[in-house]
Image: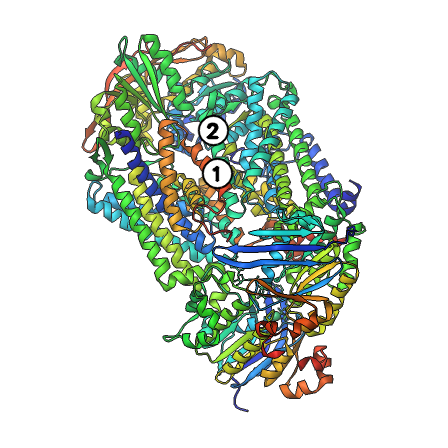
Amino acid sequence: PSATPVDTETTAGGGTTAAETTGTETSGSAETPAGEPVKVAIIYSKTGPLAAYGETYYQGFQAGLDYATDGTGTVDGRELEITYTDDGGDPDKAVAAAKEAIGNGTKIMGGTVSSGVAGPLAEQAEQNKVLYISGPAAADAITGANRYTFRSGRQSLQDVATTSGQISEGSNVLVFAQNNAFGQGNVAAAKAVLEAKGATVTELLVPEAETEFTPFAARILDAKPDLVFVAWAGATSGAMWQALSQQGVLESTNVMTDLGDISTYGAYGEASDKVNFLNHYFAGAADNEVNQALVSYLEEGGHKADLFSPDGFVAAQMIVQAVREGGGDDVEEMIAALEGWEFDAPKGPQQIRASDHAMIQPMFVVKLKDEGGQWVPELVETMDGADVAPPEAA
Amino acid sequence: MSTLILLTFTGLGLGALYFLVASGLSLIYGLMGVLNFAHGSFLTLSAFAGFEVGRRLGAGTFTGFFGSILVGAVVGGIFAAVTELLLIRPLYKRHIEQLLVTVGLSLATVALFEGIWGPDPIFLDSSGWLRETTEILGARIPNDRFVTILAAILVLGGLVLFLNKTRYGLIIRAGVENRSMVTALGIDVRRAFTLVFTIGGIAAGIGGVLASHFFGYVSPLLGGSLLIFAFIVTVIGGMGSLAGAAIASVLVALLQQFANFYLGIGDFIVVLLLGVVLLVRPQGLLGKAAA
Amino acid sequence: MKTLLAREGRGYLIGLAVVVALFVAPLLAIPGLGILPGPTYSAGSMHLMAFTMLMVAVALSYHLIFGVAGLLSFGHALYFGVGVYGLAVVLRNTQLPLLAAAAVVLVIGILIANVLGAISLRVSGISFAMVTLAFAQAGNVLVRRNPGRLTGGEEGLTMATDNVPDLLIGVVNTRNLYWVALITVAVVYVIVAWIENSRLGHNVAAVRENETRVRVLGGRPYLVKLIAFAVGGTLATFTGMVFLLLQSGASATAVSTEFTISLLTMVVLGGVGSRWGAVVGAIIYTLLNQRLNALASSPAIADLPAVLRIPLSEPMFILGTLFILIVLFLPGGVSGTLNRMVGRRRGRHPREALEDIT
Amino acid sequence: MSAPLLTVEHLRATVGGQQVVEDITFEVPATGVTAVLGRNGVGKSSTLKGIVGLYDRTGTVTFDGERIDHEPTHRIIQRGIAYVPEDREVFSMLTVEENLTLAARQDQPRWEFIHQLFPELKQRAQQRAGTLSGGQQQMVSLGRALINDNRLLLVDEPTKGLAPKIVHEVAAVLDEAARTVPILLVEQNLQVINRLAHRVVVIDSGRVVHTGDARELLDDTARVQQLLGVHGEATK
Amino acid sequence: MTQETTVGPALEVVDLSWQVGGARIVRDVSLAVAPGEMVGVIGPNGAGKTSLFNLISGINPASSGRVLLLGRDVTHRSVASRARDGLGRTFQTSSLFPRLSVLENVRLAAQQRLGGTLSILQFPRSADDATRLAREMLDVVQLGSRRTAAGDLSHGDKRKLEIAVLLAQDPSVILLDEPMAGVAHADVPGLTEVIRDLNSLGKTVMIVEHHLEVVLGLVSRVAVMHHGELLAFDEPGAIMANPTVQSAYLGDIA
Ligand SMILES: Nc1ncnc2c1ncn2[C@@H]1O[C@H](COP(=O)(O)OP(=O)(O)OP(=O)(O)O)[C@@H](O)[C@H]1O
Ligand SMILES: Nc1ncnc2c1ncn2[C@@H]1O[C@H](COP(=O)(O)OP(=O)(O)OP(=O)(O)O)[C@@H](O)[C@H]1O
Ligand SMILES: [Mg+2]
Ligand SMILES: [Mg+2]
């Protein structure tokens, strides 16, 4: 524990730029006969190591609220009283924030960008029987965690499944990852998804604290796989990609990995245009009305659409749906309102699978292109939601 | 065979990096009794400074590279000197407090760097030659490893000469033991201590810039990630022994490298090594018996 | 116990009063006054208070090792983590009821503290600090690596609630958890105070001062230090288990060096060597950390020029700076400063106890 | 008598906030040995440390007409005041030679003089000072002072714990040194005082209780008994 | 501590040697001290007196030879176990608990002797046996300032405190390393009496001391060390008359 539990709540209606647009502070609406405001607690990283993701999520959420409530901030006349709390990426703070919110009668929680925080929040949701809509955290375990927990983003299984377009029966796939929960999760996901499609999956796990990847790159060469799936997060990715380029891995085989947010576009160095990327989202990934709404809302506020913008956007859509169809007070009714719901999201058509609350959604295959010294993603292929759907969680 | 060679060279490169960090630590500890938790911050700030300068001088050029090393060394030295003057000097002789103050400094500076440069790593472009590899017996060894190893050797030689051949070296060794007695011989020992800190900072600064090239990024956590291993190296080598730090750096890095590659448990092996060394030889490989 | 009461009678009466006040606090509507998120009966406030009390308990266990025995350990988080993760893992993988599971973990905690303590104590001073750091680091790596899918790695581990009484589950029962935390901190405090005041405690202080002298008197410094270390570690394990109940989950931060450093910060803040200092330090640190987060994201800061805004919006910057200032200018921490203001000599407090009553 | 070399007026010294010297006033003339006497714990050592600035002090200290009570220790020493501490305080990790080299401040340190005074230090030049016996360490400590040309020596209990033979030698060394440089000497051994001292300053409870000619005092057995609690015969 | 009833020596060293690096610092020293005897050890600085004490008390391990305490071979036992067997010592430079009070310094020794020192069920109290004993011992050495931290004492008072600690520890064999060093003349006779009392209580005492008049007046035999060797071990009169001793140690003073 970082020895700090609760952080702080901000004012209802949110922080800085979006306060007016959400309109939650408008005085009149409180007296509407439609009833009490619906309390919503958004817990996410305002500070800490994942603050950048947090900011993207937050802005996406504002865009989604604006879109789903037509700029009113109310649902059928009921005000949404939203508190935003910083978890600093720390589960202890998140739990404290959740308890405080639940203690105050909140029935809807959303957010967090960190898998380490999502688990404890899902646990709180179950213990206290409140609705929880997880954010960008990719851990597969969130899906099917309990009947109170949903997710607005994608999960590792979907990332992995996106590579399936690149493999054929009998392909030899090597998963290159760090030996931590994220890496292990990706290996498990690859085995589950790709072996089902007839590929052989082997793994090369590197100790998490390792900083020297050259010998491992040489080992990939020796293994001669048809496809290398790289599941990597964090600061060492630059060195890892450099090692792969230096040892000639990129020339010798087909390498795929997950394209992260804009700030990581520079991390691939010489590998940038030699790698195939699978991608959750980038601004140009989808061409539909909802995405346009997202991108233009963000541009107006001086922000850029990025990897986790849709996670925030969809979270807002889901909350509005839950309140509109489920009333906002009875958690069971809200769950019913969300299960099986099909809707248009920035990425395209999405569906919440009723059985385990998996978010069925399209995924993308992209390449990086050098545009005037800047690497920018270019869409290669859109994978249909059903094709990359994760296996049902038990 | 080529794997062995590759592992050996990359291990030596890593060891050189450990040494650049550990040499300053060991020097400061050995001579002043201060276990410097802020050493990682010296390294980080230098890496950032080197990054900013390298970027302006040309990210892919040798000018940029050497410019950034120079600036990194200067920044590390200045940061260290200021730290010594403002925080360590008022606490002379109170070693635990000195340690605590450096703990506080590392907390504060890492947070400050996050405020300035953001918490995420910034990936950097190294110069062309550094990014390339040289083939030795079938193993393609990244060129920056050679540069790092060379830098470590130069720093080691310079430090040994300084301590054993200069009057400042003598003053420093005496001052560690009994500062007030050194002043009572008419010597201003505080200047010597500032110098030690500065030298440690310079070594860390060089290490920081090289580390940023080695790892391919700069981030507020860069220094901290190396610090624990540098501590371990310092203890295994024998606190205060430069030669010990050099040997232990190479030993730890090679062991870690091989164990990680073949067994995937490099970190545990290193901790195990530390445990064994301390049980068999509590003062470390080349440490002075019971100081 | 009689002697204990007699010796520090007034102190214990005050302590008892504090415990009683804290015990009834959740039943009353005492306003939070900006320190707590709401009145004392609200779930958020009770949780924060319970959390703070557990931090006080770990800080006290650390005080026993660092403040009393003079052993600068950088690995205390490990023993806390054994409690948190141990209980989480046992609850998840066995059908043991809570108390039995806790007993198992406590035994494991005692074993680990003794074994690692026995090895670490072969060296002293800075080397000791480094060995404890290395062991804790190995523990941290182990947890993060998720061996056998036991620990959940960086994703953490939620508590399996099947065998935990319903009275301790859910926000509606926060008050019960609060009381459990209160009992925990009271128990830890009494144990630490008891040991400090016992003959053993005086022996611990003597070993801290001059080991050779103790040996020449026929004492066993190694044993004395090991007892202090193991008791401190075990108390941390105990507190860690309660912490798991409070948080319903384990995360890798519980076994991180950062956590040990925050304990160190608490003890230094309060005043090294002072039991009350550890208590006060833990409270100040925990609450400050919380309020500084609020400050960091407040509009008042956002409008400042960058030179001020950037540092002030980083809570750890402010805490780190505060820590430095205390070490530099208030060497006795909060308790030392208060003592001096009241006119007592500094650095002598535990040892004066004997003479005070003579 | 000519103008004093060192004047100490109303010196107070504190350690860790505790006052260890109350109010000391005396003068050291430009020649001869001035001995500071007194029982254990009366503040003799602290007085010396106050003069060279090793303890916080207030009051006036004038050396050769210049105030030195606000200068840091190393400046005071650089003025030509050598200080030999009570517990030798050799650098135990340094060799004998390094100990001496460190102390040498002038271009031509008096190595020959030192080696002639203490031949053993020459033999043991490369031994770590920490492994020397108590007496050998005292030689190093004295050697560090005598290797420079000084204008004043402050010497604190140089014969403490030394064998009679060495006590004798040390006294001879100091006697020799006193021909060229004035000495302020703290000493318990009245035989040594008797041999060396010209003037005495007696301290009790942090205050000067007697100053005067050494002979006069030592011959007055009753007065010695009264001031120091020692039988006069001990001087013989 | 029960007195040994055997007639053998209370302390005996046989061919004791200590080597550091190449240097032999103590060379084949053999001597035996009878129960209740007080023996002086003199010799030039660096002769190896302190080293001999370190070997006997176990601070340094012997390179060869044996140490017998009350008839028991303790050569390979720890410092602590020798202490528990009844060996006590002081150090040339005071070794105390600097931040503990004077009373507590003595009390800890008493506690160790009376047992239960690791007990968490007992608390140090002003009225318990250990404290009472400690006070008595402080009275014996006439040390008044009991609340002072030991580290704040003057040199002479530290010496007294060390003796008080020894008294409280009540060992049957005592090694005193220059107890008079730095003690004011006025206090020497008092301290001498205390040491004499120790001896008359039946303790066996070995004392290193440069104050010859003190040693010679106290002891029954004197051991003279020189260059690590035992040069002579005899009655004071014989020692003073010994020409080798004169040239090696006493110099022209004698
Ligand atoms: N560092 C210190 N901390 C606390 N008290 C001290 C310190 N140094 C000296 N004192 C106290 O100051 C008083 C004077 O001490 P000082 O050493 O000057 O006496 P002294 O006359 O030299 O005695 P001695 O003959 O024993 O050397 C003593 O009571 C001693 O306890
Ligand atoms: N650890 C050591 N390493 C090397 N030499 C040592 C060590 N300890 C002591 N010596 C040497 O052994 C010799 C004897 O030292 P010791 O301290 O026993 O002498 P001593 O008779 O007690 O002298 P003094 O009367 O001056 O205290 C000295 O020459 C000393 O330098
Ligand atoms: Mg003195
Ligand atoms: Mg000796």
Q: Quick check: B167 above or below B23?
A: below
Residue A370 falls in image quadrant: top left
Work out whether residue C35 can be spotted: yes
- Tell whether B181 sits left or right of D232: left
Rendering coords of residue B54 (x, y %)? 25, 44
What's the residue type where badge 2 is placed? Leu
Chain assignment, label 1 = B
Q: Quick check: D79 above or below A277?
A: below
Query: At 60% across and 85% down in the image, what residue appears?
Result: D199
Label disc, if present, on residue B276 of the rendered structure? 1
Q: Quick check: A293 above or below E22?
A: above
Rendering coords of residue C299 (x, y %)? 45, 39
Rendering coords of residue E100 (x, y %)? 67, 55
Q: Residue furthest left?
A: A372
Rendering coords of residue A42 (x, y %)? 47, 26
- Residue under label 2: C142
Query: At 42% across and 30% down in the image, what residue appears?
Result: A19
